[in-house]
Amino acid sequence: MAVKEIYRGRLIDVGLETLQLPDGVHLELEIVRHPGGAVVLAANADNEVCLLRQFRHAVGDKIWELPAGTIDAGESPADTARRELQEEAGVRASVWRDLGSVWPTPGFCDEVLHLYLAQELEVTTARHNRDELIEIHWFPIETVLSMARSNEIRDAKTLAALFRGSAFLKHHT
């Protein structure tokens, strides 16, 4: 496989990759390489879930999403989850459940997102980055699942974590 570097950024690299598929077909693909990330479904003792309302320039709007972030060099996905939950939501958790991982856009990107459920929460202070415009909200799990079903939540990582994690939370649908 040959790779022609198109772009090297602080978060992603983009390359034109010349390859042979398992069936013998040769082609070129534009591939985005990403370090991966972690997503946290945080639920408090009242079964309320932390949702962030965050402005996302790429879609030109504020969207609903769970706390999440990119894995830093040398950091484990679990450490990323703990860091992002504290930085974005101002919360620490003493109970963690690994919900597996997902590929959000495997047609052109190798990003892997690791999903976690965080419980037994302690409120601390959020420390948003300069580029983050974030509002922190807490909603009953039933409300959040309704928001997902009604297309109010459109963020794929949030939908995946809700799908995987809601089975571990008490709710009435």
Image: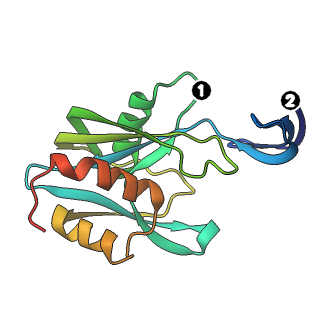
Is the C terminus in the top left, top right, bottom left or bottom right quadrant? bottom left
Residue 97 image offset from top left, x and y in percent: 25, 34
Q: Earlier in the sequence, mark 1 or mark 2?
A: 2
Q: Is residue 63 above or below residue 159?
A: below
> What residue sits 66% from the left and 51% below the top?
107
Q: Which residue is mark 2?
A: 1
Choose mark 1 or mark 2, whichever is in front. 2
Disc 2 element: loop
**Callout 1 amino acid:** Ala
**Residue 65 placement (x, y as % from top left):** 40, 61
Name the image quarter holding the N terminus: top right
* Secondary structure category for the residue under label 1: loop
Q: Tell me if 80 is positioned left or right of 140 in this view.
A: right
The quarter of the picture where residue 81 lies is top left
Residue furthest to the top: 74
1 vs 118, left or right, is right
Q: For this rendering, which residue is in front, 5 or 8? A: 5
The residue beneath circle 1 is 73
Position of 89 relative to 145 (above/below): above
Residue 143: x and y in percent read 20, 70
Give the residue at x 14% y 50%: 169
Residue at 60% x, 75% y is: 60
How far apart are the two marked residues, 1 and 2, measured between alpha carbons?
A: 25 Å
Q: Amino acid at mark 2?
A: Met
Residue 124 visible within the image: yes
